[in-house]
Structures are given as structure tokens and as C-alpha cells.
Image (spheres, helix red, strand yellow):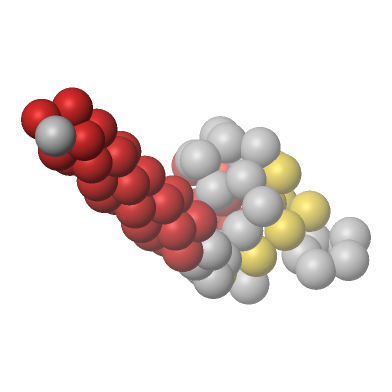
Amino acid sequence: MRIRRIFAAVIAAAALAGLGLTGAATAATTTAQVAPSVVTPSECKQGGGTPAINEDGNYCKGGTYNGEQVD
């Protein structure tokens, strides 16, 4: 009888820990999907990047603002 209670407690703790990890992974995924901001060409250069104005999308290449749209 005592072994069943201990076993049930271990299973319940493992299930709750799994739910906590799943929630943390979902929160991290949601946080990572933030819309890119728009930076000026001078901000791109100050961040160590190169504004790629002539390429599709006008993005900043490299530096702090890598991949962000240049306006």
C-alpha cells in the first residue's frame, strides 16, 4: 500500500514537472516571434551593420540590427 502511494506521488510530480517545461518552451517560442523593427541607415551603421538598401526588403546586414528593415 505504501509503495503505491509513493509511486503515485512520483508519477504526479513527474507529470507536473513536464507541464512546467512545456509551458516554458511555449513561452520562449512565443517571445521569439517578435515583429522586426525598422531602423534608419545611420542606426544600422552605428550598430556595426551595412544597410542593404538596393536588395529586396531593404534590410540591415550584420551588427546589432542584423535582419531588421531599413527605412
Classify 37 as above or below 4. below
Q: Quadrant of the C terminus?
A: bottom right
In the displayed structure, does residue 52 sit left or right of residue 54? left
Farthest front residue in view: 1
Query: In the depicted view, which residue is nearer to us: 4 or 49?
Result: 4
Q: Residue at x 23, y 41 (%)?
A: 8
Which residue is farthest left? Answer: 2
x then y, percent, for residue 35: 54, 70
* Residue 52 appears in the picture as rendered: yes
Q: Residue at x 21, y 35 (%)?
A: 4
User: In the picture provided, is 55 more to the left or to the right than 64?
Assistant: right
Check the image and report above or below for 8 versus 42.
above
Q: Nearer the viewer, residue 62 or 28?
A: 28
Q: Is residue 28 shown to the viewer in this render?
A: no
At a point 61% along the width and 58% down the height, the residue shown is 68
Which residue reaches farthest right? 55
Give the image quarter of residue 56. Answer: bottom right
Residue 47, horizontal then vertical, whole percent: 49, 40
Q: Is residue 9 left or right of residue 34?
A: left
